[in-house]
Image (cartoon, coloured by chain):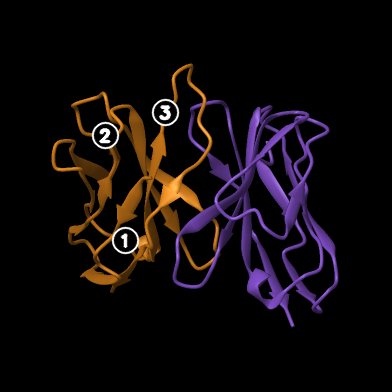
Chain colours: A purple, B orange
């Protein structure tokens, strides 16, 4: 099993550009999550999904959108990138109340 | 809302010695999980240990153990026989359990940077 994979590893965006961060898991987990980690801080939840076709907002959803068309994939869309979205983004998955397993992260810089 | 506090921004320990990282949390819930995650320089978030609040017995995983004090809302991590590979940022995290078993988020502390010196 590859676990949770994320692409790209690094990305630099200009203000106002858009991009999609990809996340895929091969553990057949029904729950998936997107977090962001700002310097010197813990992770904060952006969006989560409890299954295909079901998504909901976390603590910091503004400026982001998600979709979940399959069990395996949970892409995060940034529209109109802003410097405040410079962060490291982590995708995670879990089987219901079980432990969350994290991907390797995507470092995004918005200039 | 739940909060997680890690009062030690940085700690250091000599190789082969024992170190304890502190974590306190604030919640009115009775059913929850607590976690310690490790983040080495590679940035990967790695689960170290998990504790279910309904279990009185402290969780252990090889050299890692916790001291879970539910009444005091304290959840410290002890690392025995520290190794150079233990150098990392350590995050304490809280997860509330909803009726029916659904969960939706981890609440993280700000982390403790642990350096193991040779």
Quadrant containing the N terminus of chain B is: top left
Sequence-wise, which precedes: disc 1 or disc 3?
1
Residue A40 pos. (x, y %):
44, 71
| Residue visible at 57% across and 27% down in the picture | A95
Secondary structure at numbered mark 3: loop
Among the 4 quarters of the image, the one containing residue A84: bottom right
* Above/below status of A79 relative to B97: below
| Relative side of B32 to B19, left or right | right
Sequence-wise, which precedes: disc 3 or disc 2?
2
Residue B25 pos. (x, y %):
27, 48
Disc 1 and disc 3 in contact, CB within 8 angstroms: no
Which residue is the site of mark 1?
Answer: B83
* Above/below status of B2 relative to A49: below
Quadrant containing the C terminus of chain B is: bottom left
Answer few, some or many: residues within 10 Å of disc 2's Cα (few below 14, many 20 plus, some between 14 and 19).
Answer: some
| Relative side of B54 to A83, left or right | left
The chain letter under disc 3 is B
Which residue is the site of mark 2?
Answer: B59
Q: State which mark lies toward you, 1 or 3.
A: 3
Q: Mark number for residue B97?
A: 3
């Amino acid at each position: 099993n590859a676990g949770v994979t994320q692409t790209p590893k690094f990305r630099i965006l200009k203000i106002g550009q858009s991009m999609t961060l990809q996340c895929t898991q091969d553990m057949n987990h029904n729950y998936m999550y997107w977090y962001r980690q700002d310097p010197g801080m813990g992770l904060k939840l952006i969006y989560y999904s409890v299954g295909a076709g079901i998504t909901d907002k976390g603590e910091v959803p503004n400026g982001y959108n998600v979709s979940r068309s399959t069990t395996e994939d949970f892409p995060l869309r940034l529209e109109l990138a802003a410097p405040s979205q410079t962060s490291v983004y982590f995708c995670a998955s879990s089987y219901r109340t079980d432990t969350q397993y994290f991907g390797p992260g995507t470092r995004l810089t918005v200039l | 809302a739940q909060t997680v506090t890690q009062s030690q921004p940085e700690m250091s320990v000599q190789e082969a010695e024992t170190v304890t990282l502190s974590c306190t949390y604030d919640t009115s819930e009775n059913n929850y999980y607590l976690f310690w995650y490790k983040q080495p320089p590679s940035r990967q978030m790695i689960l170290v240990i998990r504790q279910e609040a309904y279990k009185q017995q402290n969780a252990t995983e090889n050299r890692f153990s916790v001291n879970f004090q539910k009444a005091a809302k304290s959840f410290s991590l002890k690392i025995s026989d520290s190794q150079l590979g233990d150098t990392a940022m350590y995050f304490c995290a809280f997860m509330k359990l909803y009726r029916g078993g659904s969960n939706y988020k981890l609440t993280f502390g700000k982390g403790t940077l642990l350096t193991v010196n040779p």
